[in-house]
Image (spheres, rainbow, N blue to C red):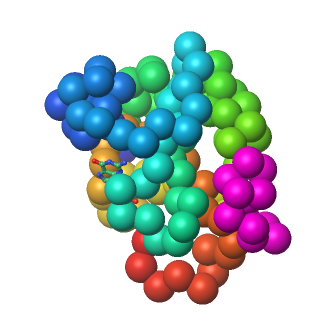
């Protein structure tokens, strides 16, 4: 239920600058970057700089900062890709399908309902 944070996870390395990413937006508390295996054009990830595996471990302040970034980046991604709507989602824990153990929000232009594997 409360997994221990691994400082060597991929997104921690991206935050430290040890791994590259295509940066979309960054501020004091969050980073937004393109997904390396996009489910669709424009697939973007928003992560907090605070270390946490799941949303349930994240401080309310960091969660709010993530939502502010989603509100900035989501409409821009949607406009750039020409989709009418967009889907925001995130997974908590391996059993839910989370593959990178640093909390992240997916911004996916269009509907998430017609994608089989996420
Ligand atoms: P999850 O299944 O954990 O919700 O989603 C993890 C996401 O991170 C996946 O969509 C995957 O393509 C993306 N991802 C995994 N490794 C990397 C990486 O090294 N760089 C970037 N930009 N995205 C990654």
Can you tell me which quadrant of the image ligand 1 is in?
Answer: bottom left
In the rendered image, the quadrant that contains the C terminus is: bottom left
Q: Is residue 17 visible?
A: yes
Q: Quadrant of residue 11?
A: top left
Pinpoint residue 74: horizontal percent, then vertical percent.
71, 49
Q: Position of residue 59 (x, y in %)?
A: 56, 22
Residue 2 in view:
no
Left or right of 23 in this view: 113 = right
Q: Which residues are magenta?
A: 75-86
Looking at this view, name the residue that lies furthest to the top.
Answer: 28
* Relative to 35, 8 lies left or right: left
Examine the structure image and report whether residue 57 is included in the region drawn in magenta.
Answer: no
Q: Residue at x 55, y 38 (%)?
A: 24
Q: Is residue 111 above or below residue 89?
A: below
Q: Residue at x 30, y 56 (%)?
A: 99
Q: Is residue 99 above or below residue 114?
A: above
Q: Where is residue 16 drawn, in percent x and y?
A: 29, 21
In this rendering, would 68 be left or right of 34? right
Image quadrant containing the N terminus: top left
Q: Residue at x 45, y 21 (%)?
A: 50
Q: Quick one: which residue is furthest to the left in this view? A: 8
On screen, 61 above or below 63?
Answer: above
Residue 32 x %, y %: 53, 37
Q: Nearer the viewer, residue 62 or 20?
A: 20
């Amino acid at each position: 239920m409360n997994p221990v944070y691994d400082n060597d996870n991929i997104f921690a390395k991206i935050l430290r600058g040890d791994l590259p990413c295509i940066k979309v937006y960054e501020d004091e508390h969050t980073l937004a970057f393109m997904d390396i295996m996009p489910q669709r054009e424009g697939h973007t990830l928003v992560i907090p700089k605070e270390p946490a595996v799941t949303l349930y471990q994240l401080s309310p302040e960091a969660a709010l900062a993530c939502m502010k970034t989603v509100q900035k980046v989501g409409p821009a991604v949607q406009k750039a890709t020409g989709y009418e709507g967009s889907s925001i989602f995130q997974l908590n824990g391996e059993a839910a399908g989370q593959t990178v153990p640093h909390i992240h929000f997916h911004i996916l232009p269009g509907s998430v309902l017609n994608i089989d594997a996420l």
